[in-house]
Image (spheres, grey):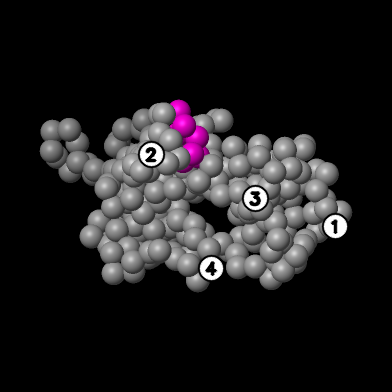
């Protein structure tokens, strides 16, 4: 089973518990960019995956997908260390950001790829499709967000990100402040209804805190094989209760008085 994780997600604890309880059922955790969460599920690239949408803006079709909400994240604004936002102690009001120039990570990445491919802004061709099925790691993970933060650090704009992503990508020349009065992000796990299985249900149980040995478990953890009470030749062994190991069946001699 493949779990698709996204920037800011921390599935390590769940993966460890899975491998302890079900060592015969392999679980792979692969990281991808935020873009293409549902495409990876629909194409079978992953069996179950993290999905994150702005509140009230979910693109998930509940007739095709199951979803379990895990938590809500605050939106944060990232700006240059010299920006007025840096003077705020903890948060800024969403209304105060209306006149700011916002940097969209996806658009930044798209323009970067178009430029590398020699596609001009007025070429009239359709945008190149983003590769949403390739795994990411290290500096290649959240590449669009990293580029956007570079722009923010230069003072050319501000970036709005989920709090977990901003913290993972934090830099000394960029400040992070919570946005008060703005819709947050809902993060959960999703999978195709058509591909629902005992394995997926078992993983959802772990994510929800189900304890090992729960009667709701659809899979049983490995148990040692039952001991046979027959000899290798197939004969039933006599019980030796009350007799010491290694002693013969002869009667004991009476004690001397």
Give x and y (percent) for residue 190: 39, 58
Residue at image mark 1 = 89
At a point 60% along the width and 38% down the height, the residue shown is 146
Please identify, in this view, whether the residue under mark 2 or under mark 1 is nearer the observer: 2
Please identify, in this view, whether the residue under mark 2 or under mark 4 is nearer the observer: 2
For this rendering, which residue is in front, 159 or 216?
159
Q: Is residue 57 above or below residue 16?
A: below
* Stretch of the chain drawn in magenta: 109-116
Q: Label for residue 123?
A: 2
Q: Label for residue 55?
A: 4
Q: Please tell me in which quadrant of the rendered image residue 2 appears.
A: top left
For this rendering, which residue is in front, 158 or 65?
158
At a point 27% along the width and 47% down the height, the residue shown is 44
Which of pointers 2 and 3 lies earlier in the amino acid sequence?
Answer: 2
Q: Residues within 10 Å of mark 3 (few under 14, many from 20)?
A: many
SS assignment at label 2? loop
Residue lying at the far front of the rendered structure: 122
Q: Is residue 114 magenta?
A: yes
At a point 40% along the width and 29% down the height, the residue shown is 117
């Amino acid at each position: 089973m493949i779990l698709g994780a996204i920037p800011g997600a921390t599935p390590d604890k769940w993966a460890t518990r899975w491998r302890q309880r079900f060592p015969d059922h392999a679980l792979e955790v692969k990281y991808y960019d935020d873009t293409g969460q549902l495409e990876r599920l629909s194409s079978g690239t992953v069996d179950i995956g993290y999905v994150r949408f702005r509140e009230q803006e979910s693109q998930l079709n509940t007739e095709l997908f199951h979803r379990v909400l895990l938590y809500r994240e605050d939106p944060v604004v990232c700006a240059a260390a010299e920006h007025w936002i840096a003077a705020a102690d903890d948060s800024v009001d969403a209304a105060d950001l209306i006149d700011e120039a916002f940097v969209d990570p996806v658009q930044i990445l798209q323009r970067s790829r178009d430029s590398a491919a020699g596609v001009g802004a007025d070429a009239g061709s359709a945008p190149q499709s983003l590769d949403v099925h390739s795994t990411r790691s290290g500096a290649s993970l959240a590449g669009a967000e990293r580029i956007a933060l570079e722009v923010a650090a230069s003072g050319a704009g501000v970036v709005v990100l989920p709090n977990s992503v901003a913290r993972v990508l934090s830099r000394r020349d960029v400040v992070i402040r919570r946005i008060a009065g703005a819709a947050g992000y809902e993060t959960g796990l999703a999978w195709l209804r058509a591909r629902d299985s005992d394995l997926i249900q078992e993983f959802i149980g772990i994510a929800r805190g189900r304890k090992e040995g729960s009667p709701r478990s659809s899979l049983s953890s490995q148990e040692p094989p039952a001991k046979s009470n027959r000899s290798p030749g197939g004969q039933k062994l006599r019980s030796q209760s009350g007799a010491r190991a290694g002693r013969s069946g002869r009667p004991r001699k009476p004690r001397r008085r």
